Amino acid sequence: MLSLFYYESLRQGHIVNTVGNRGSEEGLTFISGGVRRQYPRTAVSRQGKVQMRRRRRRYGSRRKEENQNIKLVGNILLWAVQIAAVLLIAFLLVFYGGEQISNIGDSMSPALENGDTVLVNRLIYKLRSPQMGDLVVFKPNGNENSHFYIKRVVGTPGDTVQIIEGFLYVNDELVTDLPVTRISNPGIAQEPVTVEEGCYFVIGDNPDSSEDSRHADVGNVRLEDIEGQPWYILSPSEHRGRLE
């Protein structure tokens, strides 16, 4: 009641005196209908403190609820970002490193046997060029109707490849550090073959059972026709492991 008097009187200009001296019982002088009334300072102070505490509790309750809502929204956004990141990483791993291809034939024996399923890294040759000794997956001349071939790179752009008496020579030097067995059919490599820019000369590790760059219908393999690098044997389980 006192507060209502105070604020209404303040609005109408009826408050004529306030005393703020510590310890004084005088608080304010109020005139209503010609009657002069004196209210103790302690009464004014007590009422104000009660109202202040109520306002603080209401304000604190609203702030607490707002903070809880903000925290909940933040957690939901964080979970959404984490889930999206996991899904993106999983997609990239499968897309670039998890393509499955079946090996057909014995041209890469003993590294790969007929029917082995391998995982192909499709990202690696977007970062670097194929190197001597790399295994590559490709379709001859980009023929989409063909099955994938898996062969080993023995000549890179600018190299000269030739097969002499069953042995592989690159730039007139005998190659001895690749697991390619003796070659009985030199094919077009009976004469020196220069590897064009952006192309690669490939041979199977078991050349007598391999159709590769020695054959005119395959020839040098263009970089854009290379799908990627086989890096892991997925099945059968007895062959499972990394490919070298």
Image (spheres, rainbow, N blue to C red):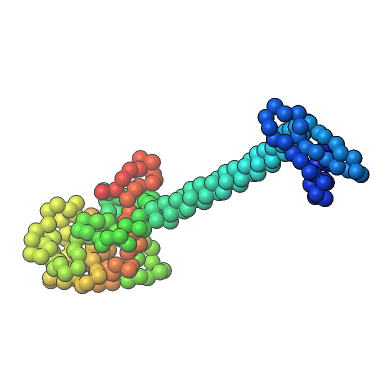
Residue most toward the right? 33
Q: Is residue 64 left or right of residue 92?
A: right
The reply to whether residue 165 is visible in this rendering is: no
The residue sitting at 39% across, 56% down in the picture is 96
The residue sitting at 21% across, 72% down in the picture is 196
The residue sitting at 57% across, 48% down in the picture is 77
Camera-nearest residue between 176 and 108: 176
The residue sitting at 11% across, 62% down in the picture is 169
Q: Compared to 122, does 112 lie above or below?
A: above
**Residue 124 quadrant:** bottom left
Camera-nearest residue between 202 and 190: 202
Camera-nearest residue between 63 and 70: 63
Q: Is residue 233 left or right of residue 20?
A: left
The reply to whether residue 86 is visible in this rendering is: yes
Q: Compared to 218, does 183 lie above or below?
A: above
Q: Give the position of the N terminus as an image quadrant.
A: top right
**Residue 68 quadrant:** top right
Q: Is residue 61 left or right of residue 177?
A: right
Q: Is residue 18 left or right of residue 148?
A: right
Q: How far across and down, in percent of the image, does residue 130 sit?
A: 25, 60
Q: How far across and down, in percent of the image, does residue 175 sit?
A: 12, 57
Number of on-image labels: 0
Residue most toward the top? 23
Q: How far across and down, in percent of the image, does residue 35 sit?
A: 90, 40
Q: How far across and down, in percent of the image, does residue 72 sit?
A: 61, 43
